[in-house]
Image (tube, grey):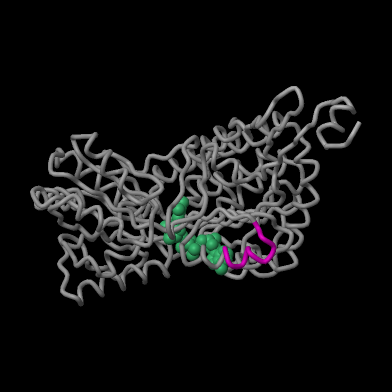
Amino acid sequence: MTAFDRDFTMTIDGAGVSSDATIDVINPATEDVVGQAPDLSRDQLDAAVAAARRAFPAWRATPLDQRRILVAKFAEVIGGNAAAFARLFTLEQGRPVDKAMQEILASAFWAQSISQQEIPVIVNEDTPERRSETRHVPIGVVGAIVPWNFPMMLGLWKIASALVTGNTVVVKPSPFTPLTMLKLGELMREHLPAGVFNVVSGGDAVGPWMTEHPGIDKISFTGSSATGRRVMASAAANLKRVTLELGGNDAAIVLPDVDVKQVAEQLFWAAFGNSGQICIAIKRLYVHADIYDAVARELVAVAERTRMGDGLEQGTELGPIQNRQQFERVRALIEEAKAAGQVFLTGGEVPDGKGYFIPVSIVDNPPEDSRVVTEEAFGPVLPLLRFDDVDEVIARANASEYGLGGSVWSADTDRAEEIAGRLETGTVWINEAQYIMPWTPFGGHKQSGVGVENGADGLLEYTNPQTISIRKTVAPAELRAEQGVAA
Ligand code: NAD
């Protein structure tokens, strides 16, 4: 199938459900309406949560091998409809269709890989008297809340992990990009028992309804740090478990011994891929003074040969900002930098016309306390920052409320590793960036998150540890002696 129909319904208790109200989903390249997503009512959310609760006992009792097969079905369904998913993805998200395809295929790969992950049983003690082991049992109903920048892959991280460990799911995509997830729900209906996997869509009210819902036991949330704080406060009402994957302001530190030409191309894509709308994009680029001018020249050269446009047009490498709200935020950041007299090496002028396009914009060594440095732009605006001394640049990199990722670039990997160990972030890459895999834990320090996704640690966030302690048969005389009872 190369294109989906434009009927979008939610999946609640195994059935397609529409609602009285709808939300227009906008193509950010043209500002045309791509489709209408249901805007669910509170009663409909209650129905989805109730369905997930009803389905939970049978799903947790389903043998693990059977759950693995059903989770792997996500990979089959996504892979089997990859072209249609990629096209719909580009229409609602804006990313060029070949790069949209990468996310679709990555989502299938993640589902397949997570379906095979081990759920460990830890033997704490095994002696003639006693056996104590800790198992990992499902938590219950998981509410998954997904942002608009990677609407499919980030959804699949949560869905596959929650389901394989025996939980049931209610997933809510962003109101800006709900369509691919709604289609996935529709296509999965025939494969999963009713209520195991529910997909709902709606406006700004729905996230808070979920985080305060007494029928939801865990929230797995990806989004901004500001929203993450609200999620955590709201989840406290019934002590929901939370995993929070939040914002970042990743620093890259480039030492003077790199091959400038080669590294500049990598740095460019690590900063501007998905038009900068990546949580682990390079958002502060620190370059040693000896090579600062050369790196600046190369980055500008890459920017000038990179094509931005409608993601459905052949040859487009960068798409628009995903939504108007974010477009206005990034534009304001650029205007503020210009008003403060900061110099743009390239970009800095937002064109008029249809679509939320912001050109690649590189700011020349702005002050460390300017908003373009301290805030996550989440758009194609990058501060290029000069440094002389390694201790000083590490302090600057760490002087952030965020702690998601970071990278060090050097021909001397021992030296780079020593620097990496001093960065206060969940992941540090050396001579690359953004390498993430289903078997590697990923999460943020400081205001960038709580908990991790992926890897053994990520999977276990969807479980409660349960320790079973067995006192093996003992002779009554022995027991009396142990308890200090006179024979
Ligand atoms: P956002 O916080 O505005 O929204 C994320 C999701 O939360 C959406 O589905 C939204 O509808 C929902 N939501 C909004 N208010 C809510 C509330 N009060 N309670 C519950 N849910 C609510 O984020 P966004 O703008 O969609 O995404 C961009 C942000 O996400 C950036 O900060 C980016 O760095 C971050 N992000 C982090 C990761 C990561 O893995 N750490 C990955 C991708 C994006």
Q: As drawn, is 434 to the left or to the right of 184?
A: left
| Magenta-highlighted residues | 232-240
Q: Quadrant of residue 126?
A: top right
**Count of all numbered marks drawn on residues in the image:** 0
Residue 195 x %, y %: 75, 49
Determine the residue positioned at 48% across, 45% down: 86
Residue 146: say if magenta. no
Can you name the residue that lies furthest to the top here? 128
> Is the residue 176 above or below the residue 76 in the image?
below
Determine the residue positioned at 46% across, 37% down: 440
Q: Observer-nearest residue: 406 or 204?
A: 406
Visible residue check, residue 90? no
Q: Observer-nearest residue: 133 or 348?
A: 133
Dominant SS of magenta comes to helix
Residue 392 x %, y %: 19, 55
> Is the residue 171 above or below the residue 98 in the image?
below
Residue 248 x %, y %: 38, 57
Q: As drawn, is 288 to the left or to the right of 82?
A: left
Residue 236: say if magenta. yes
Determine the residue positioned at 16% across, 62% down: 365
Visible residue check, residue 49? yes
Residue 363 x %, y %: 19, 62
The quadrant of the image that shows the N terminus is top right
Q: As drawn, is 260 to the left or to the right of 360?
A: left
Determine the residue positioned at 42% across, 57% down: 446
The quadrant of the image that shows the C terminus is top right
